[in-house]
Image (cartoon, helix red, strand yellow):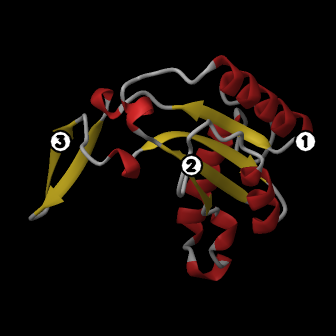
Amino acid sequence: MKFMIVGRGNAATEAGELPPQQVVDDMHAYNEALAKAGVLLAAEGLHPSSQGAQIAYSGGRASVIDGPFAETKELIAGFWLIEVKSREEAVEWALRVPAPPGCEGVGLHVWRVFDPSDVPEASLPEEEREREQALRARLRGGTADGTGPIGS
């Protein structure tokens, strides 16, 4: 099962401040532990919302709202994508994320990532399933039948 551990932003991350060197070192050690355990799929920090945008929908139309955004406590500062055996294991890994000094309240969210295998096979038309498998194979650098990278 894939899980996303989402780190919340705060005034410092929104100001683009880098964390203290000890926090950076602790994060590198944490990421190394995830990689060594073979569960890390991706981990990235995010720039402040002033470099981002939100897409809002109204009356069937989309509009772009440029950052920065006012509610820093609702923003995301970074994430880890991990693949583990259970929600409990994902929570155990999340509990090991080094918290920066002064961290109070909810700082992380742990979300299970929806996987195509979560959809009962009978509920998905075969054409749709094949298209999904082909896309995922391309993302992994192979073909849908597992014979190797596309274009090689």
Q: In this figure, which residue is indicated by the disc labeled 1?
A: 37
Q: In this figure, which residue is indicated by the disc labeled 2?
A: 6
| Residue 40 place in picture, x, y as percent | 77, 40
N-term-proximal mark, 3 vs 1: 1
> If the image is split into quadrants, where does the C terminus sit?
top right
- Above-or-below relation of 123 to 2: below
Query: How would you rate the neighbour count of disc 3 (Cα within 10 Å): few for under 14, some for 14-19, many for 20 or more?
Result: few
Task: Say whether marks 3 and 1 touch (CB < 8 Å).
Answer: no
N-term-proximal mark, 2 vs 1: 2
Instruction: Please state which of the two labelled residues, at mark 3 or mark 1, is closer to the viewer.
Output: 1
Q: Which mark is residue 64?
A: 3
N-term-proximal mark, 3 vs 2: 2
- The amino acid type, in three-letter code, at marker 2 is Val
Kindly report the distance in space between the C-alpha atoms of the residues bearing marks 3 and 1: 40 Å
Residue found at x 77% / y 33%: 31
Query: Looking at the image, can residue 152 be seen?
Result: no
Residue found at x 43% / y 40%: 10
Kindly report the distance in space between the C-alpha atoms of the residues bearing marks 3 and 2: 23 Å
Residue found at x 63% / y 51%: 5
**Label 1 element class:** helix
**Label 3 element class:** strand
Tell whether 130 sits left or right of 27: left
Kindly report the distance in space between the C-alpha atoms of the residues bearing marks 2 and 1: 19 Å
> Which of the pair 106/85 is nearer the observer?
106
- The amino acid type, in three-letter code, at marker 1 is Ala
| Residue 70 place in picture, x, y as percent | 24, 44
